[in-house]
Image (cartoon, rainbow, N blue to C red):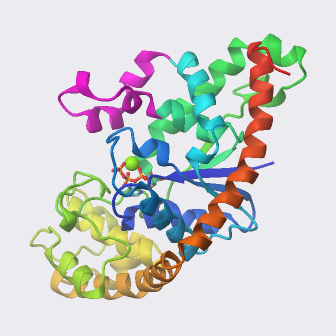
Amino acid sequence: KPLVFSGVQPTGNLHLGNYLGAIRKFVALQDSNDCIYCVVDLHSITAQLVHDDLASQTRSITAAFLAAGIDPKKHIVFNQSRVMQHAELAWIFNCVARIGWMNRMTQFKDKAGKDRENASLGLLAYPSLMAADILVYRATHVPVGDDQKQHLELTRDIAQKFNNDFSARIAELGLGVEMQMGDETVNGFFPLTEPIIGGPAARVMSLRDGSKKMSKSDPSDLSRINLTDDADTLSKKIKKAKTDPEALPGEVDGLAGRPEADNLVGIYAGLADTTREAVLKEFGGQQFSVFKPALADLAVHKLAPVADEMRRLIADPGHIDAVLRDGGERAGAIAEETMHSVRDIIGLLQD
Ligand code: ATP
Ligand code: MG
């Protein structure tokens, strides 16, 4: 049975990339799946341990989930650190994964920068915790932005190595499920989770630099559209967004080699829930002086209701905390069931 899991870090401002690449997909998936959506607070301390406002950021991401339309009664919404089994399974996965696998992760290379020896060990092991977040629920599908593709591949590698290393124990304990791997049918404990990536806004780029993804941790606020930007700020940022002097092309091919133009067209398509083709059909031949105000109007129209609802929810932190507590209890029950089996498979002594 499909089970959807995904997470968002409580660091910095939620931006349009997070919304279009992830949160809006979370909402769409809840009609036909069981979903678990997590504010991954333990991930947010990998880059920077000391935060003044981790709790309020956690509430703010939760508010965004609810404001976007996630139903915390039908599904599960909670913050990661409440369910200690995530960290427990991450430790085991640290012993499954190889250092070489972690060293190859582009996010680690980007975030660690030049002084890699001085990055936290947590930043290196981040994908191992991410694999644990997903697999502690044996989730089958993970909606994410394009930047997380490599981490999802690693999650599959970890699941596969665990299934393989413990295949005899898994079979002996009767804990496996039949899975198709290539032409082979294997009996594995952890599923090989599929990412759900796609649509015109799977990778929203910075407004200042078409070669960098829009990011919460970018020091320049002009680089991103925050979910909570007011109409004036939003219009100003779009107006200032880097572009080239050409008019918009009539066909998608014409966006090749024009990353900033491609990005704005992709954002428009994402917000309007359509394709780049359709956007260019409407705006092909027009200058950015026409397209940018249209994009700003659309963004305000789509984002303002979510931001208003977020503000309303944040005003009642007691309600948000109750949602997280309830979600944490329900998530914890599932996670403990998985961990009990994992401890048995490994041979750890328990009651
Ligand atoms: P940071 O830069 O600090 O890692 P972030 O903006 O990447 O922050 P995360 O909390 O790491 O935010 O990611 C939450 C979700 O948003 C993930 O599914 C991620 O793939 C998605 N996402 C992040 N940035 C973008 C983007 N620019 N375009 C599309 N999706 C994105
Ligand atoms: Mg990220």
- 216 sits left or right of 10 in the view: left
The answer to whether residue 321 is above or below residue 43 is: below
Residue 239 screen position, x and y as percent: 17, 79
Residue 155 screen position, x and y as percent: 56, 32
Query: Which quadrant of the view contains residue 176?
Result: top right
Specify the farthest residue to the left. Answer: 245
**Residue placed most toward the observer, 140 or 56:** 56
Q: Is residue 195 visible?
A: no
Query: Which quadrant of the view contains residue 243?
Result: bottom left
The number of numbered discs placed on residues in the rendered structure image is: 0
Q: Is residue 200 magenta?
A: no
Question: Principal SS element in the magenta part?
Answer: helix
Q: Which residues are magenta?
A: 98-126
Residue 260 screen position, x and y as percent: 21, 63
Q: Is residue 107 magenta?
A: yes
Query: Which quadrant of the view contains residue 11?
Result: bottom left
The answer to whether residue 138 is above or below residue 61 is: above
Question: Who's the residue at 81% across and 11% down the image?
Answer: 168
- 283 sits left or right of 18 in the view: left
Question: Who's the residue at 68% across and 37% down the image?
Answer: 136
- 40 sits left or right of 215 in the view: right
Residue 289 screen position, x and y as percent: 16, 85
